[in-house]
Image (cartoon, rainbow, N blue to C red):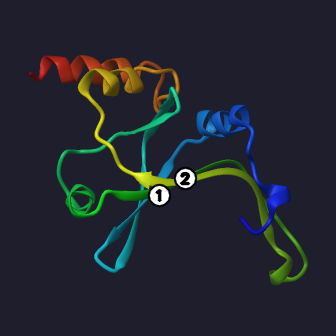
């Protein structure tokens, strides 16, 4: 990171950003082209749980290349100025990278039932119930 004075290294603050963020952007590489997709997510126990259908472009890409990156932010504020070049933004963000790992069913349920689930309160419980009843 170029601006070390802006880097967040406190695990509690990193967790707070993930707790407050509404969307996580997942970055993938499709051959030689980048692909970024906004996703619903949960954060629990140091893991990100991303909600996704079991098919589609994202799943196809992950089948060929499991290296991913992600970004989530909170507290976004536009900083206005007289000149266009002086405009900016204030925010807190978390960026990470690594291999994508599939979660086991019980672990995935735990992630989606957490209070960190980015949706209507209790939605994670509903997802768990629907998944169980679909079997």
Quadrant location of the C terminus?
A: top left
- According to the picture, the residue beneath numbered tag 1 turns out to be 69
Q: Residue at x 31, y 57 (%)?
A: 66
Query: Secondary structure beneath disc 1?
Result: strand
Depicted 3 relative to depicted 66: above or below: below
Q: Relative to the observer, which residue lies in front, 63 or 72?
A: 63
Task: Say whether residue 27 is left or right of residue 17.
Answer: left
Query: Secondary structure beneath disc 2?
Result: strand
Q: Residue at x 76, y 54 (%)?
A: 7
Q: How far across and how far down the image is residue 73, in percent?
A: 63, 50
- According to the picture, the residue beneath numbered tag 2 turns out to be 96
Where residue 51 sits, quadrant-wise, is top left
Depicted 68 relative to depicted 109: above or below: below
Depicted 17 relative to depicted 131: above or below: below
Question: Answer yes or no: do the residues labelled 1 and 2 have beta carbons within 8 Å?
Answer: yes
Residue 82: mark in rendering? none
| View extreme (right): residue | 82
Quadrant location of the N terminus?
A: bottom right
C-alpha gap between disc 1 and disc 2: 5 Å
Task: Say whether residue 76 is left or right of residue 37.
Answer: right
Label 2 crowd (10 A; few <14 / some 14-19 / many >=20) = few
């Amino acid at each position: 990171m170029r601006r070390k004075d802006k880097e967040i290294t406190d695990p509690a603050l990193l967790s707070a950003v993930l707790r407050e963020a509404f969307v996580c952007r997942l970055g993938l590489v499709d051959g030689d082209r980048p692909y970024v997709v906004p996703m619903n997510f949960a954060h629990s126990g140091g893991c990100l749980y991303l909600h996704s259908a079991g098919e589609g472009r994202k799943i196809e890409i992950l089948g060929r290349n499991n290296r991913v990156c992600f970004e989530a932010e909170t507290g976004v504020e536009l900083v206005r100025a007289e000149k266009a070049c002086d405009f900016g933004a204030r925010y807190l963000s978390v960026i990470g990278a690594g291999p994508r790992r599939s979660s086991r069913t019980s672990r995935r349920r735990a992630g989606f039932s957490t209070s960190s689930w980015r949706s209507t309160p209790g939605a994670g419980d509903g997802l768990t119930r629907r998944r169980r009843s679909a079997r």
